[in-house]
Amino acid sequence: MAIQSHITRQAGHPWDGRPGFDILEVVSDTQDEFDAFDKKAGLKFWNVWIKGVDSASGKPAAVYYKPSGIQRPWRDSPEHPHPGCT
């Protein structure tokens, strides 16, 4: 079992590319492993951008994002966009 992950620092916001956001891409071999990772990601303030199944491998996958370096809960919505951290 394995989790494959990749973080891109200062990648920009996934909706509109505004600066100050990191992206975390994850693919897991099993759903149980993915669920455990998902909980840990939330504790590190990552928010889900998209979650489901990787189209190439059929494995559980997600893309998360957060303001760069943030260490506290945060919110983001089209009505109230987070400014990001640069």
Image: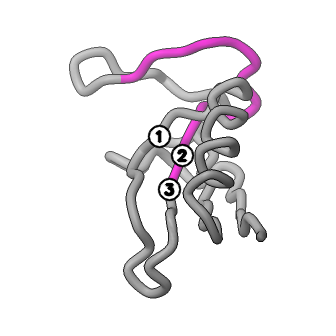
Residue 64: x percent and y percent?
A: 54, 46
Real-space Cα distance between discs 1 and 2? 4 Å
What secondary structure prevails in the magenta region?
Answer: loop
What is the quadrant of the C terminus in the image?
A: top right
Name the foreground residue: 67 vs 36: 36
User: Mark 2 touching mark 3, by CB under 8 A?
Assistant: yes
Asked if marks 3 and 1 touch (Cβ < 8 Å), the reply is yes
Kind of residue indicated by mark 1: Val
Q: What span is in magenta?
A: 63-76
Name the secondary structure under disc 1: strand
The CA span between labels 2 and 3 is 6 Å
Under mark 3, the amino acid is: Ala
Residue positioned most to the left: 79
Outermost bottom residue: 56
In the picture of the structure, the residue carrying the numbered disc 2 is: 64
Where is residue 53 drawn, in percent x and y? 41, 67
Residue at the image position 30 percent from the left and 15 percent from the top: 80
Q: Quick one: label 1 or label 2, which is nearer the N terminus?
A: 1
- Which residue carries the number 3 mark? 62
Which labelled disc corresponds to residue 48?
Answer: 1
The disc at residue 69 is: none
Tag 3: Cα neighbours inside 10 Å, few (<14), some, or many (≥20)? many
Residue at point 49% right, 84% down?
Answer: 57
Q: Front-most of 72 and 53?
A: 53
- Graded by Cα atoms within 10 Å as few (under 14), some (14 to 19) or many (20 or more), the crowding at tag 1 reads some
Discs 1, 2 touching: Cβ within 8 Å: yes
Quarter of the image where the N terminus is located: bottom right
Q: Is residue 82 magenta?
A: no
In the displayed structure image, the side of residue 3 where residue 12 appears, left or right: left
| Relative to 1, 12 lies left or right | left
